[in-house]
Image: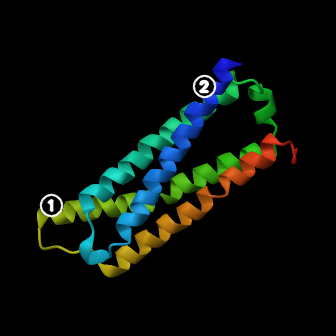
Amino acid sequence: MWSDAILAYLHFAAIFALVWFLAKEWTLLRAGADALDLARLVRADAGFGVLAGIVVATGAARAVFGLKGWSFYAHNPVFHLKLGLFVLVGLLSILPTRAFLRWRRARNADASWRVPETEWRSARRWVAVELHLIGLIPLAAVIMSRGLAR
């Protein structure tokens, strides 16, 4: 019972930290194309990537070693929806990540370089989409844990 509680805690803590890093990206992007702190933005994005891996690892540990066991999760369509949403967010995050790295390289090469407004708007839009999609995952978790859809 204790191991299940610890696994759940680690998974939830990783999820909260992941959302914090994504919200940090959104907050940094709100500064506007001309005022971006690219170093902090790239660090926040890297944190998001690291935490995504930790969320997957703790979730897998919870599914395999937790009280409900893998058989509960393997055939649950809502679990597959949760995973699908998480994978979709991960795939969508590639677009802003590539932009952030490209911007940092350009700024390092030329200190007077500025982020193009259209690219900034696009990255901001993708991060907003990620935030909205990630917000649906807890709804799926609640539905799954209550056995409302099987």
Q: Is 61 drawn above or below residue 22 in the view shown?
A: above
Q: Nearer the viewer, residue 6 or 148?
A: 6
The residue sitting at 55% across, 66% down in the picture is 129
Residue pointed to by mark 2: 6
Residue pointed to by mark 1: 108
Where is residue 12? Give x, y as percent: 59, 39
Q: Which mark is residue 118?
A: none
Where is residue 21? Give x, y as percent: 43, 52
SS category of the residue bearing label 1: helix
Where is residue 137? Give x, y as percent: 66, 52
Q: Residue furthest bottom?
A: 117
Query: Where, quadrant-wise, is the N terminus in this rendering?
Result: top right
The residue sitting at 80% across, 28% down in the picture is 71
Query: Where, quadrant-wise, is the C terminus in this rendering?
Result: top right
Q: Nearer the viewer, residue 16 or 112?
A: 16
Left of 100 or right of it: where is 111?
left
Q: Is 70 drawn above or below residue 107 in the view shown?
A: above
Q: In the rendered structure, which amino acid carries the disc numbered 1?
A: Asn
Q: Are marks 2 and 1 in contact (CB under 8 Å)?
A: no
Left of 54 or right of it: where is 112?
left
Quadrant of residue 106 in the image? Answer: bottom left
SS category of the residue bearing label 2: helix
Return the disc, 2 or 1, that comes first in the chain's sequence.
2
